Image (cartoon, grey):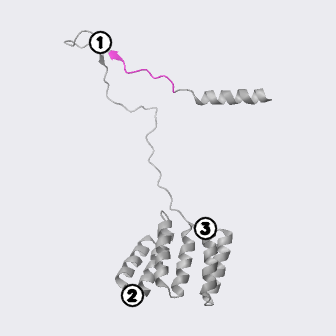
Amino acid sequence: MQRVVLTISLALALGACATAPYEPAAPVRPSAPGAAPGEAGVSQSPASPNPASPAPVPEPVPAPRSHRLGAATSALVTQARSASAQGDFDAAAATLERALRIEPDNPLVWIEMGRMRLASGDAAQAQYMGRRALALAAGAPREQSASWRLIAEALRARGRNAEAQEAARRADELAVP
């Protein structure tokens, strides 16, 4: 049995080392009149597309990313929303911090934490959470829009209305219809 496995492994390893098929070089044409003796030229044919090869396929445009909460994180976010609605921001923060330990790179958790901070009156932390979510939401327009919206609300709460208006404009540009 070991001999069969060894033989198959060796065959696979040798197969992986195979070289590309031989392709001849461009044909050599005889020396041109007036060329130095022994000097041969390489035939130059105009580059023509190979009709057998297919046309190049353009790179596909990647679909926008979308983030989702895992089951445990979703349950924690629901608990945090309930605590926040009752005004228990300490319990909401502790619950969302547990959610962040589970999914630290999920912008949706950071947005939830920012919303809770904004509701508790800590607009500076809400803005920070929105910026963190924005950094993690690369390639995800829905999450980027929600991040910009959180940033706009936090800026507005801090009295920075011109910046808030710009952030809201960015959120609207990214909003998925």
> Viewer-proximal residue, 74 or 45?
74
Q: Position of residue 89 (x, y in %)?
A: 60, 86
**Which of the two marks, 3 or 1, is nearer to us in this view?**
3
Three-letter amino acid code at the position of disc 2: Gly
For label 2, the crowd category at 10 Å Cα-Cα, with few meaning under 14, some 14 to 19 and many 20 or more, is: few
Give me the residue at 39% from left, 81% from top. 164
Q: Earlier in the sequence, mark 1 or mark 2?
A: 1
Q: Position of residue 93 (x, y in %)?
A: 60, 81
The residue stretch that appears in magenta: 20-28
Three-letter amino acid code at the position of disc 3: Glu
Q: Position of residue 14 (x, y in %)?
A: 62, 27
Q: Which residue is mark 3?
A: 103
Give me the residue at 49% from left, 71% from top. 132
Q: Which residue is mark 1?
A: 30
Q: Which mark is residue 15?
A: none
Residues at marks 3 and 1, CA–CA distance in whole angstroms: 71 Å
Residues at marks 1 and 2, CA–CA distance in whole angstroms: 83 Å
Q: Which residue is mark 2?
A: 159
* Residue 148 visible in the picture: yes
The stretch drawn in magenta includes residue 23? yes
